[in-house]
Amino acid sequence: MQENELVILHEDNHVLVVLKPQNEPCCPDATGDVNTLDRVKSYIKTAYGKAGNAYAGLIHRLDRPTGGVMVFAKTSKAAARLSEQLKNKGFSKRYYAVLCGVPSKKKGLLENYLRKNSVNNCVYVCTPAEEGAKLASLEYEITDSRDGLALADINLLTGRTHQIRVQFSALNCPVYGDMRYGGEKAVKGKLALWAYSLSFTHPVTGDKLRFMAEPPEGLPWDKFAVKLK
């Protein structure tokens, strides 16, 4: 596979499901770096010989250091329906994360109120009464642990900025490679957070769709037998 080649998991007339690489923005940002949305537009333009700008609708986001499954809309109609579905919690998003430390409970529900500081682009746990506080919820299960690390299977219930990273940092089990929120427990390396499963209803056919992708090879993933389920 050539560098920057778009990895397509599914395509039809209405949606395009792709694999976002780690450390690539999902859409244009202040860095001006190559981003997944523009690569999707470029692919559509080239593949279908479209003149001018090609349309691609950004439905949801992944943090820059997080890789995994994303869906883009190929028409404005599909974009509107998928966005409404996302708003009404019609998407199911699952992640794998390698944690520095092992949570005391093997499985559970994490709920915190979070607020974002737009100046430094960091997110903090706060009280419900603080200005800008938003509820963040996720379910997790520790499926394996070794060498002081734990593999967490995460069902994301809300889509707050940096949510998984902040909530597990608050649990004193930060995500491997998270130098921003990891504190003294941080381990240098690529962020071990991967969006491995995405489920939604097709915006036109109404079919239930699910797409999965394995985490990348290398540490710390190689320590665990990661199973897609």
Image (cartoon, rainbow, N blue to C red):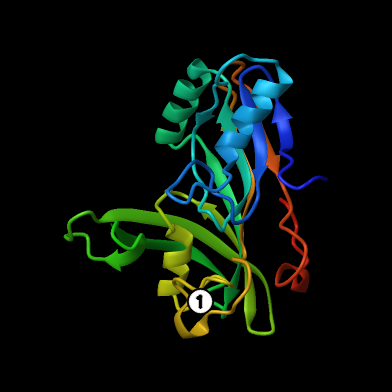
Q: Residue at 48% of width from left, 41% of height from top?
A: 28
Residue toward you, 172 or 116: 116
Q: Is residue 41 above or below residue 36?
A: above
Q: Residue at 42% of width from left, 63% of height from top?
A: 110
Residue toward you, 51 or 20: 51
Q: Identify the amino acid type marked 1.
A: Cys
Q: Label 1: which residue?
A: 173
Q: Residues within 10 Å of mark 1 (few under 14, many from 20)?
A: many
Q: Where residue 80 appears, x then y in whole percent? A: 44, 22
- Residue 142 is at least partly visible in this image: yes
Position of 212 with respect to 203 (left or right) is: right
Q: Where residue 143 appears, x then y in whole percent? A: 67, 67
Q: Is residue 190 above or below residue 18?
A: below
Residue 132 position by quadrant: bottom left
Report the residue that reaches farthest toward the right. 1
Residue toward you, 137 or 6: 6
Q: Where residue 204 appears, x then y in whole percent? A: 58, 16
Position of 75 with respect to 120 (left or right) is: right
Label 1, secondary structure: give it: loop
Residue toward you, 228 or 192: 192
Q: Residue at 32% of width from left, 66% of height from top?
A: 124
- Residue 88 is at least partly visible in this image: no
Residue 26 position by quadrant: top right
